Amino acid sequence: MWDLYELGIAAAVFGVAHTDLADPWYDLRLCGPSQGVAPSRPGFVLNAPYGLDELVKADTVIVPGVPEECVHGEREIPVELIDALRRAAEGGTRMVSLCNGAFALAAAGLLDGRPATAHWAHTRALAERYPRVRVDASVLYVDDGDVLTSAGLSGGLDLCLHLVRRDLGAHVANQLARRLVVPAHRPGGQAQFVEQSLPVTDDGIAPVLQWAVENLHHPLTVDDLAARAGMSARSFHRHLRAATGASPMRWLLRQRLARAQELLERTDLPIDQVSERSGLGSANNLRHHFAQHVGVSPTEYRRTFPSNGKDPA
């Protein structure tokens, strides 16, 4: 038995040719350990046209899940799958799991000594069965360079969009997210549980956040945003954290960094102007936050995603 959702996520992101966003797009191949069809929980059947030897040839391998019986130890993950995953990793393939697909990577020894996550309902079992894995049950996904793991369901979608962001840039990922009608970027460190007792669209927060995104080049304070929402600063802080899982200043920093990434990708503006337009102030401040949160300098980021010369501002 396999679950349709995680596989559907990977297919929607990587299997549909969004060549108007980036050309070439990904070439998605569905691989399985045996010929024939496999049933899913809703009653669909799956036919994998490629064998496991294809994994070794891939740039990225995504394990969208394993049967529940494998999670609870009632059934072993196929030896041939474990062997193929190991061979792919040894060849330099980027390894990715969605939801309880982490159990397959762990069984292959690919998570030993690494931080990893899975659906919160399975993280305890993952930690108990594979004690060498540094399991974090609280995050949406973990990017450990060449090995990435995610929580279940929408956490898997967040990770897939994160991969697109890494590979093709923030602008492409943002456009794809808009096409899929999902948030453009939820950082992996955000909690799996985000309380939303007050929907964003019903408490006055959404228009304020949209206004903030359109005015990132201005100095913005929590008091400014709270006043625009007609709330006290304390109340605004509480509402925003309930809606996004982040404090107002951390949320603002994420938006400023996203804006800076877009400007670096889509314009030839000097670094100091990128910093000013994104609201990060000086070029040194931009470099500091890029090094801390993106992992590369603004110049290195721009080199990875060359500008098309169009100014989005």
Image: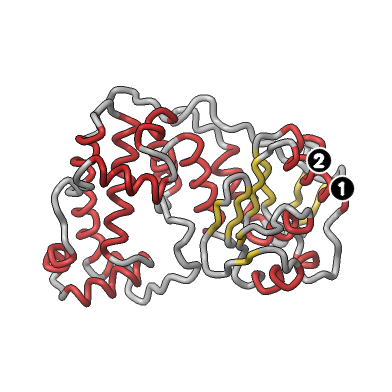
Query: With 73 as the anchor, is 195 left or right in this view?
Result: left
Q: Amino acid at mark 2?
A: Leu
Q: Position of residue 102 (x, y in %)?
A: 68, 58
Q: Position of residue 114 (x, y in %)?
A: 64, 57
Q: Secondary structure at mark 1?
A: helix
Q: Position of residue 14 (x, y in %)?
A: 57, 39
Quadrant of the image occupied by residue 40: bottom right
Q: Position of residue 251 (x, y in %)?
A: 31, 59
Query: With 129 as the anchor, is 290 left or right in this view?
Result: left
Q: Secondary structure at mark 2?
A: loop
Q: How many numbered circles are shown?
A: 2
Q: Nearer the viewer, residue 264 or 51?
A: 264
Which numbered disc, 2 or 1, marks the residue that appears first in the sequence?
2
Identity of the residue drawn at 82% across and 48% down: 81
Q: Could you tell me if residue 184 is visible in this image?
A: no
> What residue is shown with label 1?
80
Q: Nearer the viewer, residue 293 or 13?
A: 293
Q: Amino acid at mark 1?
A: Glu
Quadrant of the image occupied by residue 258: top left
Q: For the C terminus, which image quadrant?
A: top left
- Mark 2 and mark 1 in contact? Answer it, CB < 8 Å: yes
Q: For the N terminus, which image quadrant?
A: bottom right
Q: Residue 52: give its label.
A: 2
Identity of the residue drawn at 72% across and 52% down: 110
Q: How is the image coloured?
A: secondary structure
